[in-house]
Amino acid sequence: MSSSPGHVMMSHHTGVDTTRPPQVQRMRQRRKVATAAAGVMGGIAGLAVLGPIGALAGGVGGAMITKQAGKRLERKQTDRIAAARIAAEEARYGRDVPALASDSTMT
């Protein structure tokens, strides 16, 4: 089974993402819960202010804004995790990290 760059490997039995570090998996789960909660709260606030149309707009708007903010924070944290991993590999192998050296010769 080949995997494309955008494809995430999931365990068939447990539904667990096997390609991302546990910190990233927790961030994704937390973002999904926060997005759902913001959608519900936005819908309630919109209903109270503008009725059914406000509920729809508030729910969708709240969820979209929360999702984008969560993704931005998740991206920052993922970059920090990657930088720490690269620094650890450089400390372990010296400046010539095998995985990074092969990438630099391809450019």
Image (cartoon, rainbow, N blue to C red):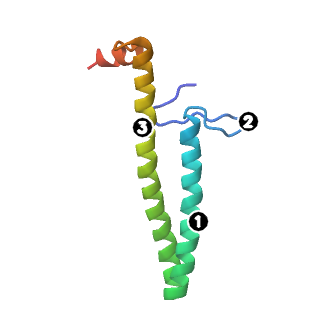
Circle 3 packing at 10 Å, graded few (<14), some (14-19), many (20+), is: few
Circle 1 packing at 10 Å, graded few (<14), some (14-19), many (20+), is: some
Q: Which mark is residue 73?
A: none
Q: Locate residue 52: give its quadrant.
A: bottom right
**Quadrant (top left, top right, bottom left, bottom right) of the C terminus:** top left
| Residue tagged 1 | 37
Q: Locate residue 80: give its quadrant.
A: top left
| Residue tagged 2 | 13
Q: At 46% across and 35% down in the image, what residue appears?
A: 81
Q: Marks 3 and 2: CB-CB under 8 Å?
A: no
The kind of residue on which mark 3 rests is Arg
Task: Give the residue furthest to the left.
Answer: 107
Circle 2 packing at 10 Å, graded few (<14), some (14-19), many (20+), is: few
The kind of residue on which mark 2 rests is His
| Residue tagged 3 | 80
- Of callouts 2 and 1, the N-terminal one: 2
Q: CA distance from mark 3 to mark 1?
A: 27 Å
From the top left corner, tell me how far across and down residue 39 is, in percent: 54, 68
The kind of residue on which mark 1 rests is Ala
